[in-house]
Image (tube, rainbow, N blue to C red):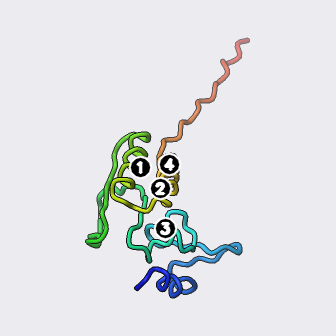
Amino acid sequence: MSAHLQWMIVRNCSSFLIKRNKQTYSTEPNNLKARNSFRYNGLIHRKTVGVEPAVDGKGQRKPATSYEKITINKNARATLSSLRHIIRKNNYRKDLRMAALRRASAILRSQKPVVVKKKRTRAPKTA
């Protein structure tokens, strides 16, 4: 079935649709921007790109054979560089490259530990 025909079927009736604030969002896997649109839909295209944070390894499901899962445990710059390299060398869609890099960057920012600033305490008053 062609991607356009699948889009016409899935466009308005999908279990992944969320309609909120006059916007239609989608929670399907491999949808980089969570928008309900033909370009970012992760169900209908043959080659899709998905970026997710790595799990700790407990309770993993067996992925379908059509998915290639790559876990990258490097610093932020090397992670983004290797993601760019993977998308380019495996001939994924070029229009998703920037969205994938932005998604990975947001995930890396969210995983950065928060530095708590210590409050200065005043010296006790001496009489």
Q: Are marks 1 and 2 in contact (CB under 8 Å)?
A: yes
Please give the name of the residue rendered at 50% of the width and 72% of the height, measured from the top-left corner. 41
At 38% from the left edge and 68% from the top edge, which residue is drawn? 47
State how far apart marks 1 and 4 are (Cα): 12 Å
Q: Is residue 123 above or below residue 98?
A: above
Left or right, residue 87 beside residue 10: left
Query: Quick check: 49 above or below 119?
Result: below
Q: Nearer the viewer, mark 1 or mark 3?
A: 1
Circle nearer the N terminus (1, 3): 3
Residue sticking out furthest to the right: 127
Disc 1/disc 2 C-alpha distance (Å): 7 Å
The structure residue drawn at horizontal position 70% and vertical position 72%, both measured from the top left corner, is: 21
Q: Which residue is mark 4?
A: 105
Discs 2/3, front: 2
**Are discs 4 and 3 less than 8 Å apart at CB?**
no
- Circle 3 residue: 31
| Quadrant (top left/top right/bottom left/bottom right) for the N terminus | bottom left
Give the SS element for disc 4: helix
- For label 4, the crowd category at 10 Å Cα-Cα, with few meaning under 14, some 14 to 19 and many 20 or more, is some
- What numbered label is drawn on residue 97? 2
**Distance of label 4 from label 2 (alpha carbons):** 12 Å
Disc 4 vs disc 2: which is toward the camera? 2
Q: Which quarter of the rendered picture does the C terminus lie within?
A: top right
Q: Residues within 10 Å of mark 2 (few under 14, many from 20)?
A: some
